[in-house]
Every structure is written in structure tokens, then in C-alpha cells.
Image (tube, helix red, strand yellow):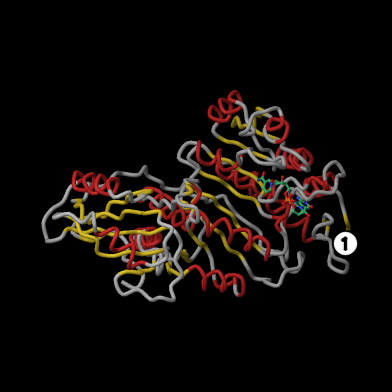
Amino acid sequence: MTRITIAKGDGIGPEIMDATLEIIKAAGAQLEIDEIEVGEKVYLAGNTSGISNESWDIIRKNKIFFKAPITTPQGGGYKSLNVTTRKFLGLYSNVRPCMSLHPFVSTKHPVMDIVIIRENEEDLYAGIEHQQTDEVVQCLKLISRPGCEKIVRYAFEYAKQQNRKRVTCFTKDNIMKQTDGLFHQVFDEIAKEYPEIENEHWIIDIGAAKMADTPEAFDVIVMPNLYGDVLSDVAAQITGSVGLAGSANIGEECAMFEAIHGSAPRRAGQNVANPSGLLQGAIMMLNHMGQTEVAEKVQNAWLKTLEDGIHTYDIFKEGVSKQKVGTKEFAAAVINNLNNKPTILKSVSYANNAALNLPKYQRKLAASKKLEGVDLFVHWAGTDPNELSKIISKIDSKDLKLTMITNRGIKVWPDGFKETFCTDHWRCRFKPSENHDINNSNIVELLNQAISQNIDVIKTENLYSFNGKPAFSLGQGQ
Ligand code: NAD
């Protein structure tokens, strides 16, 4: 018996949760269930995170959380329960299998069978945003080595367990050389530990285009958070329906399983929703708990039911489907098929699933870190970079000198183009005048000088080298 926490959610949530639980229990799932309330009611009762402290305690105790979709009320101020749960519980890995069910569910991509593994905690989703000037806001993109190592290792371990042949990495490291560069570098490092699995890297733009056009060329794809968020929906949609995909959010201690779709409020209470997405989440949960036989039985029964043409409205198609059914009738049909396997679609076997080998992250030896300069970000409403360079050069010291100004990343001084559009947000790069060492006091001095010259510095960013290698971006055009 495994004790899990469930939340039936909002909209169609309770109906698809009841149907799913009925199916997996009939298949022999050994579960004890604690139910909690999350979502709309909790939000509207004044809890902006959509979940109470008591519910957190239950989730943390049971460690496995099975969640139906929830409705986030309209209007500002409500925090996304999904994002909070992933981050609070350290659910670093989001696994989303996207498989075509041709010819039973119409799709332009009949042989697609990919799994998107998305980093789930960092990247632009750290949610660290600031307005800095009248014209410019920023969002910090944070990528960490532990974050990269954990997700990339997860992808290779998953591929190994599932007998998949290749892991592809998508990044934009031709532009983001530090952040996406680290993700790609860690991918290359960890790929070497799995010589039996092919590996490749694609720049995300052409990779995404290729995935949308020729998904059969891909197997497992691993990527940072934002790209994974977008592309996992694309991948699910092009299999034929987002209503058929589930997802797993896995951490070192806890895990959460769900459907990828929302609460479809307009379909609620009518016994029409397709429970398949949540059922797919349940199958991943059963595999995660080691109840692989039950997972296998349910997946094969589900495939057989789709093959029998017993379809809910969202995938029903004249000529292909045989019977249009509601949520309850679909569940009953799957239960009826529990001892059957599909004959045209490929049946699954999870019996030999080995456990994933996911050692805890080991912090590396600290590199030798050297201060190489500083970027002062300045709010200035003028337009001519040459004029700004004269103002800023006034704070040059014997230690630090202005060497470059950029605007939105592009070098505008020295030798800028007059065509370059400039906002009121300027990065002024200071480097040591000669090859002597500098420290933080030099930067404080520089800031004091800036104050005395009425220069509006809105932030500073230290420039470092690690083990002798510069670890900051150049100005574009530098
Ligand atoms: P949605 O996924 O709920 O619905 C999109 C479309 O797909 C609708 O036409 C809907 O009827 C259909 N659909 C979705 N699931 C279906 C199913 N199982 N069977 C049949 N048809 C299905 O997306 P939305 O309308 O943008 O969002 C509705 C609410 O869900 C919003 O409040 C949103 O915040 C929330 N949401 C929650 C989650 C989650 O809890 N994980 C995820 C996405 C959206």
C-alpha cells in the first residue's frame, strides 16, 4: 500500500479524478488516499496561493501528490499553484510523453512518440523581475549547474530505463552563451556517461521547427524551463489532442502527477470530459511507486479502448470512432478491457523497468574567481551615447576606466552606429586601467563618484573570470 495525497480540483477535475481512481483501483492499485482541497474555493476564500498550510503538511508527509486541474480565478493577485508546488517541493523534472495514437486519433504525425523532459524550477521562471528605468524592465534568467546536472541526468536515466535510443538537447546557446551555454556544456559532459544512448544538440528555433514538422526524428528531448513549457504543449497538441497527455513532476523527495490540460469549466458537470490525460498521469505515478504491473495493465487497457473506437467527444471522429461516450462510460470501457492488450497500437511492458540512478548533486571544488571589472547600469534620458560617455568618464579613477557603453546589449560607444535605437537604460562597462588587480572597494569608490556626479546608477554587475576564463558576455558588436 502506498499513501498518496489527491486533489480533485475544479471544473471537470472531480469527474476525471473519480473516473481515473475507479480505473486504477479496478486494476489493483494499492493505494491509501488522503484528499485535500486546492484551487478555486481556496483562492476565493482569501488564500492567494490556493492551498492551505494543513494541505502542505499532508502533501509533504505522503510525498506523492496526484492532482486534477484547477481553475485560477480571474483577476490579479493569485499565485500559480503549479509553479509554487514545483518550487516548494523541489520538483525539478517535468516529464511529458507525447505519443500519436494513429489511426485512432487524427493527427498529421502518425508515427510520433517523443518525451519532453523540461527543467522545472529555474530559468526565467525564478520570477525575479524589476522595473529599472522609465522604459526598461528586466527578468533574471538563472541557470545553475546543479539544476542542469539534475535534469540532464534525469533525461539520460529516463531514456535508459525506457529503452529509448536518443536524447536531444534544445538550447539557444549561440545567443545566451553563459546560461544556455552551461546547460549545453553539462549536457555534453553527462552524455559521455551514457555511451549506449545517442545524443545531439539543436539550437531551439530550428529544433522546434523540426519537431513541429518531423516529430518522428526525435525521441527524448531535454531543455530549460521556458522552452520546455512552450514546446511540451506544442508536442502534446500535434499528437492530436492535449486532452490525452499527462505529466510527472519529479523531485528528490516528492512527486506530483497531473493531466496537462486545464479545468475546462464549460464542460464541467456534464459527464463529457476525457479522463485520459489524468489517467496518463496516474500511470506515471504507478510506475514511480513501483506498481509497474498495474501501470502496464491500465495503459494496455486504455490503448485497447481507444483502438475499439470508444471515444469521448474531444477525439470522436465519424468513420474512425465507433461509439461516442461520456467520462463514466469511457472509464467503464477501460475497466472492461483490463485484461486486454491493443492489437494495432503497440502494447507496453513496464515489468523490467529498472530504478533510475539519480545520485544527489555533489558540489564541485570552487574555481579561482577573479574580479575583472564592473558594469554600471545607468538610467539616463538622453539619446547620444557620446554625450553619456563624457558624463560617465568623469568618474574614471586610476583603477577603473569606462571602456564601453551598450544599450539593450548592443555596443553604442565607442564607435557605435547612429542608426542603433537607444532606450533610457545604459550599461557602462568599467575595466581596470592597467593590468592591476581590483576589488569590491574600487567599485564602492566608483559608485560614490557616481553619486557625487548625479549619475543615476540603477544596478551594478560584477565581471568575473573563473579559472582564468572570462565569464561575462561581451557587448554585441564588440
Ligand atoms: P483547458 O485545458 O481547460 O481547456 C482548453 C480546451 O480543451 C477547452 O475547449 C476544453 O473544453 C478542452 N479540454 C480540456 N481538457 C479536456 C478534457 N479532459 N476533455 C475534453 N475536453 C477538454 O484550458 P483553458 O480553458 O485555457 O483553462 C481553463 C482553466 O484551467 C483556467 O482557469 C486555467 O488557469 C486552468 N488551468 C489549469 C491547469 C492545471 O491545473 N494544471 C493547467 C492549465 C490551465
Task: Judge left or right: residue 207 versus residue 332.
Answer: left
Q: Is mark 1 within 8 Å of ligand 1?
A: no
* Residue 27 drawn above or below residue 347: above
Q: Which residue occupies the foreground of this view, 425 or 303?
A: 425
Q: Which residue sits at x=52%, y=73%? A: 206
Task: Judge left or right: residue 364 versus residue 90.
Answer: left
Q: Where's the N terminus, which quadrant?
A: top right
**Looking at the rendering, which quadrant does residue 328 occupy?**
top right
Disc 1 crowd rating (10 Å Cα; few below 14, some 14-19, many 20+) is some
Task: Judge left or right: residue 443 versus residue 272.
Answer: left
**Looking at the rendering, which quadrant does residue 30 occupy?**
top right
**Looking at the rendering, which quadrant does residue 116 occupy?**
bottom right
Residue 98 in picture, x, y percent from top left: 63, 60
Task: Check disc 1 and give the amino acid type.
Answer: Lys
Residue 101 in picture, x, y percent from top left: 71, 64
Task: Judge left or right: residue 20 versus residue 176.
Answer: right
Element under disc 1: loop
Residue ID for mark 1: 322
Residue 214 in picture, x, y percent from top left: 60, 74
Q: Which residue occupies the foreground of this view, 260 or 321?
A: 260
Q: Where's the C terminus, which quadrant?
A: bottom left
Residue 173 in picture, x, y percent from top left: 40, 66
Q: Which residue sits at x=43%, y=69%? A: 200
